[in-house]
Image: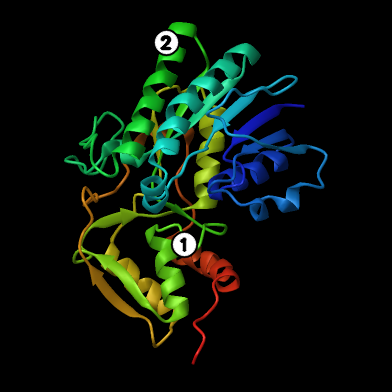
Amino acid sequence: MKRILITGAAGFLGSHLCDRFLAEGYHVIGMDNLITGDLANIEHLFPLKRFEFHHHDVSKFVHVAGQLDYILHFASPASPIDYLQMPIQTLKVGSLGTHNLLGLAMSKGARFMIASTSEVYGDPLVHPQKEEYWGNVNPVGPRGVYDEAKRFQEAITMAYHTYHGLETRIIRIFNTYGPRMRVNDGRVLPAFFSQAIRGEGLTIFGDGSQTRSFCYVDDLVEGIYRLLLSDYHLPMNIGNPNEITVMQFAKEILSLVNNPKAHIDYRPLPIDDPKQRQPDITKARTILGWEPKYNREQGLALTYEYFKKVVKPAVLV
């Protein structure tokens, strides 16, 4: 039986990855320090014999007994609210954590994958973003702790591949959504759903003309699975190239939730907020035979069902 270590296992993406690899017959070892993860995301897995959980911070020495075939490093604060509140932890999990896990992969002979991000492109001057684009990142801006942690993560992973011959994979994840997103994590989709359900103002920064591209979580997990098992070691974009303005997206949420009290609330644009986000997924299509299957209407409907359960409507006084 193949054994896989998934860090960030109690988080949004990590928990879905645990589900997928268990469904594929793997023995899954989940690891999380729970600073942003939630055990509720994986509590359904605890009765399973092929699942084990380690409460551990990967920025410290990591030990896992027995064989390991794969390591997926998905541990990191991933929303602006998180990494602005935890800048040091964000830098450490991307640097020290990655170093520790690369060492573990070397000792076990395991294939190693990192969760990189579209944020390595910064506020892009190239559109859509191809993997060959080097990015436009402010290393000392408020988002720099996350952007540079991920850029370092890519660099050290590639160094281990080149110098030590380690089997490595680098996935650059664009905006992803679905069940188990944290209600108050500050990203646009959970914020909009929560605000609309409560009948509050949907917070739009600037005039809402900035664009994003949203990928449903099941599509992303399929892309991760295919990339891990492929022979491709260079960075690869995985995301949905269907681009939409934040304003259009807010209107779609308002229409879906249909709460007459919900409205648009404009706020100043944050520093270094990207104006455009759209992945070029040519490599994923040609190398992996992958592209998204869920359109936004389908994905939002599934995600809304989750948020209706976890977001409490505003109490009338």
Query: Can you identify the residue that label 2 sits on?
Result: 162
Residue kind at label 1, given as amino acid type:
Asn
- Residue 2 drawn above or below residue 115: above
Question: Which residue shows up at 52% across the image and 13% down it?
Answer: 166
**Label 1 secondary element:** loop
Give how far across and how far down residue 3 sits, in percent: 71, 27
Residue 78 seen in the current view: yes
Mark 2 vs 1: CB contact within 8 A: no
Question: Which residue shows up at 60% across the image and 47% down it?
Answer: 16
Query: Can you identify the residue that label 1 sits on?
Result: 184
- Residue 247 drawn above or below residue 57: below
Give how far across and how far down residue 220 sits, in percent: 50, 45
Q: How is the image coloured?
A: rainbow
Residue 285 seen in the current view: no
Question: Which residue shows up at 66% across the image and 55% down it?
Answer: 40
Quarter holding residue 208: bottom left
Question: Which residue shows up at 39% across the image and 28% down it?
Answer: 235
| Badge number at residue 242 | none
Q: Which residue is situated farthest in the bottom direction here?
A: 317
Mark positioned earlier in the residue sequence (2 or 1): 2
**Would residue 70 appear left or right of 128 to someone viewing this image?**
right
Give how far across and how far down residue 63 sits, in percent: 66, 22
**Label 2 secondary element:** helix
Quarter holding residue 144: top left
Q: Nearer the viewer, residue 177 or 286?
A: 177
Crowd around label 2: few <14 · some 14–19 · many ≥20 (10 Å): few
Residue kind at label 2, given as amino acid type:
Thr
